[in-house]
Image (cartoon, helix red, strand yellow):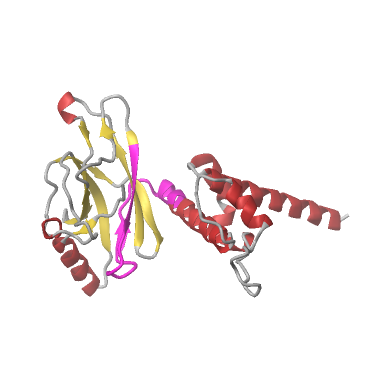
């Protein structure tokens, strides 16, 4: 199942208005509903009924954005905290999701006729992480209005780290799988693949991890849920830094 929301006509109009004023469009809330329906045809094109929507068909819950931000151009990540249901009537399978701006306009929606994104029950709360991407609007058009700034920063750095890992692995000629930690070792030990020409020069792995991303990896390792591949990369960074510190100490003797 793919998560590929459709931008609504009213959402595009709101974004165009904001853009004309030199403003970003803030995603401030997500709506969760129980209805399930098609939003794209078999070719992947948006259905007119989905583009014309101004609300979910059966919205059950609307949540503020707990954390998130723009990770790469034309993409934002949002995290919403789903609290446990108080009554049986509040429990439902999540079959539709809406992204709302700070004026309550439905910017984009997702649904699937045969699949849902989880269950809102009465036992425990949980976090729903979503990615919204676009190709035919300005790359920085959408931003996120969040409740938890520090967590948002960590989520953004984690996403950026994951993207840099993917680039390093794919540059080595390996099909990227975020759940396979052995790919990192392969990328380091075999920086070029047989499919690449001898003139090809892959990007050095550690060169991709610079600035704040490198400095904050320790925070991410403890406070964020990194994939196994990303955690292995962090450990390699720490080992490299440790070796550099030993070398510097020896040079000062």
Q: Tell how many labels.
A: 0
First to last magenta residue range: 127-155
Horizontal side of 177 relative to 136 (left or right) equals right
Residue 41 lies in the magenta-colored region: no
Residue 134 belongs to magenta span: yes
The x, y position of residue 91, in whole percent, is 20, 29
Q: What is the quadrant of residue 181 in the picture? A: top right
> Going by the image, does 226 lie left or right of 196?
left
* Observer-nearest of 98 and 149: 98
Locate residue 173: give its quadrant. bottom right
Query: Residue 98's x, y, as percent?
Result: 21, 49
Q: Can residue 219 be seen in this view?
A: no
Residue drawn where x is 22% and y is 46% of the image: 112
Q: In which quarter of the image is the C terminus?
A: bottom right
Q: Where is residue 115 in the image (x, y as percent from the top left)?
A: 25, 41
Q: Which residue is drawn at 25% across and 55% down?
A: 5
Judging depth in this view, the residue of 43 and 220 nearest the camera is 43
């Amino acid at each position: 199942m793919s998560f590929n929301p459709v931008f609504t006509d009213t959402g595009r109009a709101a974004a165009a208005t904001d853009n004309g004023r030199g403003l970003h469009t803030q995603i401030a809330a997500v709506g969760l509903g129980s209805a399930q329906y098609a939003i794209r045809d078999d070719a992947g094109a948006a259905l007119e009924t989905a583009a014309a929507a101004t609300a979910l068909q059966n919205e059950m819950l609307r949540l503020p954005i707990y954390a998130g931000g723009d990770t790469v151009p034309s993409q934002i990540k949002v995290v919403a905290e789903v609290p446990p249901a108080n009554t049986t009537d509040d429990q439902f399978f999540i079959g539709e999701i809406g992204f709302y701006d700070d004026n309550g306009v439905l910017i984009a929606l997702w649904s699937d006729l045969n699949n849902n994104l989880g269950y809102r029950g009465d036992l425990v709360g949980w976090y729903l992480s979503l990615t919204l991407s676009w190709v035919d609007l300005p790359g920085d058009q959408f931003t996120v209005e969040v409740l938890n700034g520090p967590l948002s920063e960590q989520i953004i750095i984690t996403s950026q780290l994951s993207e840099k890992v993917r680039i390093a692995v794919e540059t080595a000629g390996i099909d990227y799988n975020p759940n396979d930690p052995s790919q990192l070792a392969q990328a380091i030990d075999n920086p070029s693949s047989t499919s690449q020409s001898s003139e090809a020069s892959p990007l050095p792995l550690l060169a991709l991890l610079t600035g704040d991303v490198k400095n904050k990896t320790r925070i991410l390792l403890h406070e964020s849920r990194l994939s196994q591949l990303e955690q292995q990369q962090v450990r390699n960074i720490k080992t490299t830094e440790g070796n550099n510190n030993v070398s510097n100490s020896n040079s000062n003797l």
